[in-house]
Amino acid sequence: MSTTPAAQHLRQRALVLHGLAGRIEHLAVLTVHIEAGADTWVGPSPQLCADDLRLRGMQLQAEADQLRREARRFDRIADEMDAQTPIGAPS
């Protein structure tokens, strides 16, 4: 299949987004709430601190998911661009 420079650019951007999502998902901060105990908290209570840490981890995971959705959208657009490129057209 022939591909256009614009489609290649979108696929490259998708790869970067997938990579960023993977890096987010492997951050130690995502499991810091497991290590949080009464001696590590700041604020009204250890439970609120642990809940806040858990929430922030969930937010990071949601952002990684959003990056992956955007990467899939870029790939889908690139596929559509390639499908519209006539066979034998310069790539």
Image (cartoon, helix red, strand yellow):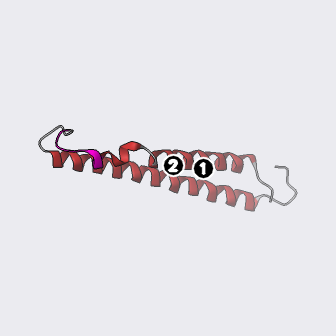
Residue pushed farthest right? 88
Amino acid beneath label 2: Gly
| Start-end of magenta stretch | 33-39
**In which quarter of the view is residue 79 placed?**
bottom right
Please give the residue where the numbered disc 2 appears in the rendered image.
22
Mark 1 burial class by Cα count in 10 Å: few <14, some 14-19, many 20+: many
Q: Residue furthest left?
A: 44
Coordinates of residue 38 in the picture (x, y in percent): 16, 43
| Secondary structure at numbered mark 1 | helix
Give how far across and how far down residue 1 sits, in percent: 80, 60
Q: CA distance from mark 1 to mark 2?
A: 12 Å
The amino acid pointed to by label 1 is Ala
Sequence-wise, which precedes: disc 1 or disc 2?
A: 1
- Label 1: which residue? 14
In the depicted view, which residue is nearer to us: 1 or 52? Answer: 52
Identify the residue shown where x is 80% and y is 56%.
2
**Which marked residue is nearer to the observer: mark 1 or mark 2?**
2
x and y, in percent, of residue 76 in the image: 62, 59
Q: Which residue is located at x 36 percent, y 43 percent?
A: 29
Query: Do the CB atoms of the residues marked 1 and 2 lie less than 8 Å apart?
Result: no
Q: Which mark is residue 82?
A: none
What residue lies at 15% left-to-right and 39% top-to-bottom?
Answer: 43
Q: Is residue 35 left or right of residue 39?
A: right
Identify the secondary structure beneath mark 2: helix
